[in-house]
Image (cartoon, rainbow, N blue to C red):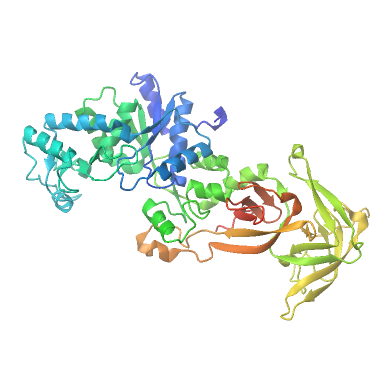
């Protein structure tokens, strides 16, 4: 990342400036700590930009730490996808760590708490613990096992570790305050039994630390100075600080919270996204309709657009929902400047130039990009038979329709003026062929006699174009907040038209050999990306974003 992309100052940086000025820390170290239980989504992009951008601003360090404390839901597939997404966004971590690398240290901290009388083994079931915890308005009550001796707790925790007990039979809890107004402080569970193999540590452990316990200790072990996290952890901050103090951590990190990114018409719940994947509703985690970074990459979103988007929405404490239109606008801004132009006819009908010599063809040179002459020219073949868009012809034109209709003259982009003379229909009355004459003096798209035409349409040669499949994507859900349970089951709000597949599109011949990930502006249509499943024999394009916003 270059200095122009470093984050603008915000309240997080104000806190950091204060800490540096007061000598609390003499450097800045952050981390991005996702759990490898799913693919990263657009909300994670904001956290990535904040953590990596903050470290870069202060010439500090940002590490990647995989929070793998729940092996039941985690997988190496997710670890690799997380790494790929971060690098695709344009960031590099200093070191890659795993919370599981600190299991020995975290375990020692648990023993320390037991020895200090600040942790105990509890035999209550999960339901009983929930019942004893109380409510937001009523205090909890002490577990009958809360006053076990240090010796008994040490013995039971050792036996838990040795695998003597079944899953859920016992837990280790911190001994804090069951009457605390902060429900997170009411003797939280810090270790549970889970007889399951771990993707990093294998079968070494059958007890695993809970997130609230492992997270501050992992931060401390790594030397993190500022633990930047989303706002839902604000109520956990007292617990974060309590663990660090109780475990006698010197120079503990400071937790600072920011509002998470909420994007309308998107689903970011990993549980619900996994359901969409497992039930085949979408084509995997990287389906272009998903709000995952891998889905956006497959759809053709440039990483710079996502970084620009995160910069525009800023960093705040206030809950807000960002409109999809802003993200699409950022995508358009980047692609408008970078994407090569091309012509593609998505719903083709044949156009025959009656007075063009039979068997003749010629090369037409057009700009690869109108604003970047350094990108050069591309060559298109012009011939007697072309393809144009079906909606660029109307046998009986409506008012203010300036494209092709009998007797009307239009410009073929970069080529000639043509005048419609006739058309053919099939047995159902559908137009299948349009006839025109062309003016040879208008090559290049201008008339030497100065006459003007009001319509310009794109085209491809019937001889030098190829057939491709184009996936037309729309929003996956019909409601702005698909996670809102009051709107019904989230799957009942799926948009049935979120994917429309066009099979017989015609693409200009110069795009033969295009590779997955290549993005083009199809003139007058939008931006399209070559899909990862595209081959030379079966070319597939995905709609990235239309030229004009379709979002209301």
Residue 116 visible in rendering: no
Where residue 17 appears, as percent x and y from the top left, is: 40, 24
Position of residue 315 relative to residue 351, above or below, is above
Q: Is residue 191 above or below residue 217?
A: below
Tell me, yes or no, if residue 464 can be seen here. yes
Instruction: Name the residue located 47 percent from the left edge and 60 percent from the top edge.
Output: 477
**Residue furthest front in the image:** 203
164 versus 284 height, above or below: above
Residue situated in front as seen by the camera: 498 or 398: 498
- x and y, in percent, of residue 371 in the image: 74, 41
Residue placed most toward the observer, 279 or 235? 279
Residue 447 location in percent, x, y? 90, 54
300 or 450: which is nearer to us?
Answer: 300
Residue 229: image quadrant is: top left
- Image quadrant of residue 172? top left
Q: Residue furthest bottom?
A: 427
Residue at 29% of width from left, 26% of height from top? 252
């Amino acid at each position: 990342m270059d200095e122009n992309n470093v984050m603008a100052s915000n309240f997080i940086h104000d806190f950091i400036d204060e800490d540096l000025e007061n000598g609390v820390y003499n450097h800045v170290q952050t981390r991005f700590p996702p759990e490898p239980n799913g693919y990263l989504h657009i909300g994670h992009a904001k956290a990535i930009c904040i953590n990596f951008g903050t470290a870069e601003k202060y010439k500090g360090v940002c590490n990647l730490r995989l929070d793998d404390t729940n092996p039941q839901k985690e997988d190496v597939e997710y670890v690799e996808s997380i790494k790929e997404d971060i690098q695709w966004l344009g960031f590099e971590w200093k070191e890659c760590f795993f919370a599981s690398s600190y299991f020995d240290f975290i375990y020692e901290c648990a023993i320390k708490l037991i020895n200090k009388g600040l942790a105990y083994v509890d035999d209550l079931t999960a339901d009983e613990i929930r019942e004893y915890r109380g409510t937001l308005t009523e205090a909890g009550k002490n577990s009958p096992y809360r006053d076990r001796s240090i010796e008994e707790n040490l013995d039971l925790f050792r036996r838990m570790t040795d695998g003597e007990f079944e899953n859920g039979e016992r837990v280790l809890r911190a001994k804090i305050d069951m009457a605390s107004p902060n429900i997170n402080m009411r003797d939280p569970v810090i270790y549970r039994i889970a007889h399951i193999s771990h993707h990093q540590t294998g079968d070494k452990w059958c007890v695993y630390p809970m997130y609230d316990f492992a997270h501050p200790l992992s931060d401390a072990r790594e030397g993190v100075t500022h633990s930047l996290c989303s706002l839902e952890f604000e109520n956990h901050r007292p617990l974060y600080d309590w663990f660090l103090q109780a475990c006698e951590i010197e120079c503990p990190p400071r937790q600072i919270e920011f509002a998470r990114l909420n994007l309308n018409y998107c689903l970011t719940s990993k549980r619900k996204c996994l359901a969409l994947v497992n039930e085949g509703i979408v084509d995997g985690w990287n389906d272009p309709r998903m709000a995952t970074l891998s889905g956006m990459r497959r759809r053709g979103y440039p990483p710079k657009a996502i970084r620009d988007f995160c910069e525009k929405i800023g960093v705040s404490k206030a809950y807000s929902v960002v409109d999809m239109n802003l993200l699409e606008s950022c995508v358009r801004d980047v692609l408008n400047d970078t994407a090569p132009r091309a012509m593609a006819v998505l719903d083709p009908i044949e156009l025959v130039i009656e007075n063009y010599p039979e068997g003749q063809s010629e090369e037409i040179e057009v700009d690869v990009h109108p604003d970047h002459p350094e990108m050069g020219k591309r060559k298109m073949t012009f011939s007697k038979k072309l393809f144009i868009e079906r909606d660029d012809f109307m046998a009986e034109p409506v008012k203010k329709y300036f494209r092709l209709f009998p007797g009307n003259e239009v410009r073929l982009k970069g080529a000639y003026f043509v005048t419609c003379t006739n058309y053919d229909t099939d047995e159902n009355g559908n137009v299948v062929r349009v006839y025109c004459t062309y003016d040879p003096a208008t090559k290049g798209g201008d008339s030497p006699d100065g006459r003007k035409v009001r319509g310009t349409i794109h085209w491809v040669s019937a001889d030098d174009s190829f057939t491709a499949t184009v996936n037309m994507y729309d929003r996956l859900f019909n409601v702005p907040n698909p996670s809102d349970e009051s709107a019904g089951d989230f799957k009942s709000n799926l948009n049935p038209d979120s994917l429309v597949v066009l099979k017989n599109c015609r693409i200009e011949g110069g795009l033969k050999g295009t590779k997955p990930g290549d993005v083009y502006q199809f003139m007058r249509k939008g931006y399209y990306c070559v899909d990862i499943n595209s081959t030379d024999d079966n070319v597939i394009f995905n709609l990235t974003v239309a030229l004009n916003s379709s979002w209301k």
